[in-house]
Every structure is written in structure tokens, then in C-alpha cells.
Image (cartoon, rainbow, N blue to C red):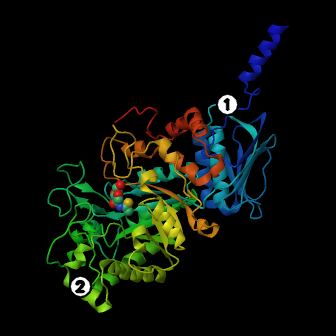
Amino acid sequence: MKKSILLIAVFLSSLNVLQAQKLDIIPRPVKIEQEDKLFVIPLAVKIIVDKKMQKSASYIASDFFKNTGINATVATGSKYGKNGISFLIDEKLDLPNDGYKLTVTQKGVLVKGKSSNGVLNGFQTLLQICSAKDVKKGTIPFVKIEDYPRFEWRGMMLDCSRQFFDKQTVENYIDWLAAHKMNVFHWHLTDDNGWRAEIKSMPDLTLKGAWRGPGEVLLPSYGSGDKRYGGFYTQQDMKEVVAYALARGIDIMPEIEIPGHSRAVTASYPEVGCVTTQETKSVQGEVKNVWCVGREENYQILDSIIREFSEMFPFEYIHVAGDEVNRANWEHCPKCRALMEKEGYTDTFQLQNYFFRRVEKIVAKYNRKTAGWNEILKGGEINPNTLISAWQGISYGIESAKKGYETIMMPGQFTYFDMAQSENERGHRWAAITDTKRAYSFEPIPNNDLTPEQQKMIKGVQGALWSEYLDRPARFMEYQSYPRIAALSEIGWTKKEDKNWDDFYGRLTHSHLQRLANMGIAFRDFPPTAI
Ligand code: TNX
């Protein structure tokens, strides 16, 4: 008798119905109710995608197949399909923006989102459930999930200047962000070491400024030795990447690095730089890398560059940088000095502020809002609509929020994934050594220093991957990105009180690292197996 009970128990547990299966969702959802029953996905299951989400339909079908091995038939519609999987927009859903409800019953799967991005977030959760270690292939446990993000902005920046990542690589990167419910890709397209965006009115920016190596005026490349190195995206490429990202719920914020970090510009068009009486260097040891703020023609050039960017990138923000400007350069430039005198300025931060106020006007002319690094707060007032990327530390973000600017928290000490992950690994070290646990410990609203109104100015969080070190070994970019981006995704999404390292680590190691491997990501393991 006892033996047969045991046998039944073993049999039932092999069907995974005795104990709740771990779903290991990252980022952790707001609310999950789970039952010990399974929906068996029929072969050639019918997927219904809301009519308003036409542009995401083929993506949903192909990613569903990649994760489950099941070839669904996809149709667009607006009604729940019995025994199938339905993805529907319900604008009246009683959840915050980007929220969704996911219900799995014997009747099938229903994902409802307040917006198409909400639906896509629910889709990602569904894929993660299907690929959780405990969940038997071809089945989905009965669940009711209600979920929405803590922050509206969950971003990641990739530096495509110091190293050039081709279009396919960028699209893969976007896929991986989407899998973590991230919604902004900050595309760092220009820097001292390469200009990567085709600009039709300034062709030399990519004919010359996208390349380095022997005979080039640019810095020697990182690790590429004597070989010519570089590349750029055509305008068509960039438009395609934008569409690719939008289908996955991701907006692209392009960045044009001005007025510093512009060696690639002056190598292509020397007249844009200052004519100085003395050469000075930027913090990164670069010469001739600053736009001349006293040269009037430069503002026309900026107008055409920003216009072309606005034609390619529909997102509401264009990022115009402003970090680490070698202002000493302006002190030795007669044109800049003349402008200072004319305006009655006593220091070069005021000159920098003058530059940004003009740039803000150009950006506004093309119906976009300006974003910049936290240094643009210096030297005078800027437009109250301008968004601040606070990179130098948490206190910089707090200061920006207190001044009333919408702020993205991206302190280098926690969210710069170019930082090494341990003493023995490669990477920058100037901000911190940041392993996944440390990255996870970041709290974007760390104290009660901010009033509730000021706290609202913190729109979200972002990571950054600068690429000076990403030349080698192969796939180091992925090693630096994951699993730290998985940790960041939870900081951006999950409620503060639900964040817990041990719990996150459990989900990560039990199911999620395998998901990353399935996506083809060469992530850093615990303990590290490379470098
Ligand atoms: C600072 S963050 C920079 C980048 C470097 C990075 C390396 C910022 C706005 N500027 O130019 O690549 O440090 O960590």
C-alpha cells in the first residue's frame, strides 16, 4: 500500500504537478498567482496579435518558436482565441503604463497590455515561463500575473565609436534588452575614435571620420594594431534598426557627442575645431577634440546634423552629450575669447552653457527634446525640458532632480558595465570594481533627501557599456553585459521592497543563465570562467 502511494507520488512529481514549478522570472513581477495545473500547448497553436500591433506580429511568432520549438500560426485580430495564445491591447486596463496581465487557464493564454509595449512585456514574461528550468517543454503552468514597471525609463547605452559593432550585432543587443523588458537603447554613435552615423550633408564624417589605423589622423586604434579599422551605419541601416527596436518595444535615443570628444569630427573637417595658440589635452589625453564655440558656421553645421538625426530617429530625445569638454582649449582660441568678451563671461562653463542653449534651440526646431550628460547643468540655466543623464555619481542625479530636471540615474559606480568585475578581470577601474551583486545593490532613489515631487523627476535607470576595452578577447562585450544587465533590469522594473539578492541569484542560476545561453550570449559565469 505504502509503496503504491510512493509510486504515485513519484509519477505525479515527474509530471511536475505536486509542487509549484519555479518560474524564475527576471525582472521579478509585481504579483504572481500560480496553480499546480498545466496548459498543454497544442501543436500549430494559434496566436492572435492585436490589430494595432501589426509591426510586432512576425517578431512574436519567430521568438515564440525560438523559445518553445512550436510553430504557431499567427493572425491579427482583436478577440481572444480559444485554446490559443492571444496578445491584446486593452487601454482601460487598471494598471500603470507598460503594465500587463497574463492569464493561463485551461482555455489558453491571454496577455493583455495597456499599450503595445505592455503587451510586449507580457510576451517576454510568457517566453521566460516557457523556458524556466522546471517547466516541461510544450506546457505552461496556470498562472495569473499582474505586472508593471517601477520606472518608465529602463535603458542601456552602447558605445559604438571606440569599437564598431555591425548592424546585426546591434540588433542582437536590442533583442537581449527586450528580453529583459528594457525600453530605451541609447546609441552612442560618435566619439573621438570614430564617427559612425552617415550624414549626407557632411560626407567626410564617415568617409574619413569612421576609420583609424595607419595614415589616419585619428588615435591609434585599441588593439587593432597596424590594420585599418572602422565602419559606419548608413541612414538606411539606422532607420532599419529603429524599426527593429520599435517592434520589440524599444525606443532608440541617438547620441551626438558635442562639443568635446570630437576628434573624429576635426579629423574630417579641421575647420570645425578651434585655431589655438596653444595645444591642450582632454582628460583622456586627446588633442583637437573640441568644437569651436566662437565659429558661427558651426551652428549651421550642427543644424544640418541634428536635422538628419531627427529624420532617422523618431524618439522624443536627441542626446547631445556635453561630458568632459576640454574647455581649456577655448581659452587659447581667439574666436572663443572674443565671444566670451562679447557676452561678458568670466569663465568657460558659461561658454559651454551658451553652446548648449543654442543647441537646445536647434533640437527644439526639429521637434525633439534635448538630453545631455550631467555637466550641461554647469555655467547657467538650461531649458527646463532637457533630460539629464547623471553618470558621475548618485549625488549628481539627486542634484539634477532637485533642480527640477527629469533625470536618468546611471552612476558609473554601479551601472557602467565597462568596469571590471573583479580585481583580476579586464576593464576600466576608475569608478569601481562592479560584479553582478554590486550592480544589483544599486538603489536609484537612495535616501529621503528628495521630496515626493523631486523623486518623480527620476524617470529611470540606465546602464552604459563604453567600449575602449571591448576589442578583445572575442565576445567580451557580452561578458561585460550579462548578467549585469539582468540585475539592472530588476532595478528598473521591480518594486524596491521586492528586490532581494538571494532571491534574484536563485532565479538567475536556476533558469536565467540557461536562457541567456539559449539566446547565444557569452555571459560571465559564477565564478568567472574567462579573462
Ligand atoms: C567617461 S561617461 C566617459 C566616456 C568613457 C568612460 C569610460 C562619459 C559621459 N564619458 O567617454 O568611455 O568614462 O568608463
Q: Position of residue 63 (x, y in %)?
A: 58, 46
Front residue (pair 86, 136)? 136
Q: Which three-letter amino acid code belongs to the residue tagged 1?
A: Lys
The quadrant of the rendering that contains the C terminus is top left
Pointer 2 local density, CA inside 10 Å: few below 14, some 14–19, many at least 20: some
Q: Which three-letter amino acid code belongs to the residue tagged 2?
A: Arg
Q: Which residue is mark 1?
A: 136
Secondary structure state at the residue bearing disc 1: loop
Q: Quadrant of ligand 1?
A: bottom left
Q: Is residue 290 left or right of residue 460?
A: left
Front residue (pair 459, 115)? 459
Front residue (pair 15, 531)? 531
Front residue (pair 190, 285)? 285
Q: Position of residue 484 (x, y in %)?
A: 48, 45
Foreground mark, 1 or 2, reads 2
The response on whether ligand 1 sits within 8 Å of label 2 is: no
In the picture as drawn, the residue positioned furthest to the front comes out as 449
Q: Quadrant of residue 198?
A: bottom left
Q: Which residue is mark 2?
A: 337
Determine the CA span between mark 1 and mark 2.
Answer: 71 Å
The reply to whether residue 66 is in sight is yes
Q: Is residue 3 left or right of residue 199?
A: right
Q: Is residue 360 left or right of residue 107?
A: left
